[in-house]
Image (cartoon, rainbow, N blue to C red):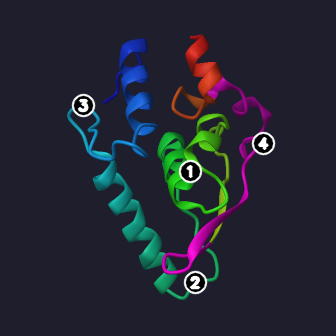
């Protein structure tokens, strides 16, 4: 938590992106994939059952990427690993917990403007895998 050294960032990102094959893998001193995904699944179910036509969730880019890659029927974790979510990026997912989810829009740019659309402003968990590996 709150560390930005390379070792910590790599451990965090590798843990998140291992949850498709090892959902019990735990973020050091934190949750495992089962716990994180259950929490996200719970709030998406509450939103779906609320009757609202649209709901916006604000969360960490890395977890948004992982949840979408593991829950949307038309993408996988490999897609999420190679596509970044810039700070203030908007991923659009449509569906229902009982019927499945479909990603309909993945951000190319930050909603907050072009000054937030570059990796230094996004943070390493929002970066595509090839940029994070180059660090």
- Is residue 1 one of those drawn in magenta? no
* Front of the two marks 2 and 3: 3
Nearer to the camera, 62 or 53? 62
Indicate the position of residue 18 as horizontal and vertical percent values.
Answer: 41, 37
The residue positioned 64% from the left and 22% from the top of the image is: 130
Please report contact status of discs 2 and 3: CB closer than 8 Å, yes or no.
no
* Front of the two marks 4 and 2: 4
Numbered marks: total: 4
Secondary structure beneath dot 4 equals loop
Q: Which residue is mark 2?
A: 52
Gap between marks 4 and 2, in whole Å?
26 Å
Specify few, some or many for label 4: CA neighbours under 10 Å numbering under 14, 14-19, or 20 or more. some
Please report contact status of discs 4 and 2: CB closer than 8 Å, yes or no.
no
Where the C terminus falls, by quadrant? top right
* Front of the two marks 1 and 3: 1
Residue ranking furthest to the front: 21
Secondary structure beneath dot 1 equals helix
In the image, the segment drawn in magenta is 95-121
Counting residues from the N terminus, which is met first, the one under dot 4 or under dot 2?
Answer: 2
Quarter of the rendering containing residue 54: bottom right
Where the N terminus falls, by quadrant? top left
* Front of the two marks 2 and 1: 1
On residue 69, which mark appears?
1
Above or below 53: residue 90? above
- In the picture provided, is 73 more to the left or to the right than 45? right
Q: Which residue is mark 4?
A: 108
- Is residue 100 one of those drawn in magenta? yes
Quarter of the rendering containing residue 117: top right
Secondary structure beneath dot 2 equals loop
Q: Which residue is mark 3?
A: 28
Indicate the position of residue 16 as horizontal and vertical percent values.
Answer: 42, 38
């Amino acid at each position: 938590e709150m560390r930005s050294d390379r070792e910590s960032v790599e451990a965090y990102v590798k843990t998140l992106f291992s949850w498709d094959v090892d959902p019990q893998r735990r973020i050091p001193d934190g949750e495992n994939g089962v716990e994180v995904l259950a929490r996200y699944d719970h709030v998406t179910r509450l939103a779906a059952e609320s009757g609202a036509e649209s709901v916006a969730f604000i969360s960490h880019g890395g977890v948004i990427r992982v949840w979408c890659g593991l829950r949307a029927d038309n993408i996988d974790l490999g897609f999420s690993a190679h596509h970044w979510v810039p700070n203030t990026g908007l991923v659009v997912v449509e569906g229902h917990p009982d019927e499945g989810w479909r990603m309909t829009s993945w951000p190319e740019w930050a909603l907050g403007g072009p000054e937030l659309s570059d990796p230094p402003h996004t943070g390493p968990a929002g970066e595509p895998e090839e940029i994070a590996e180059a660090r």
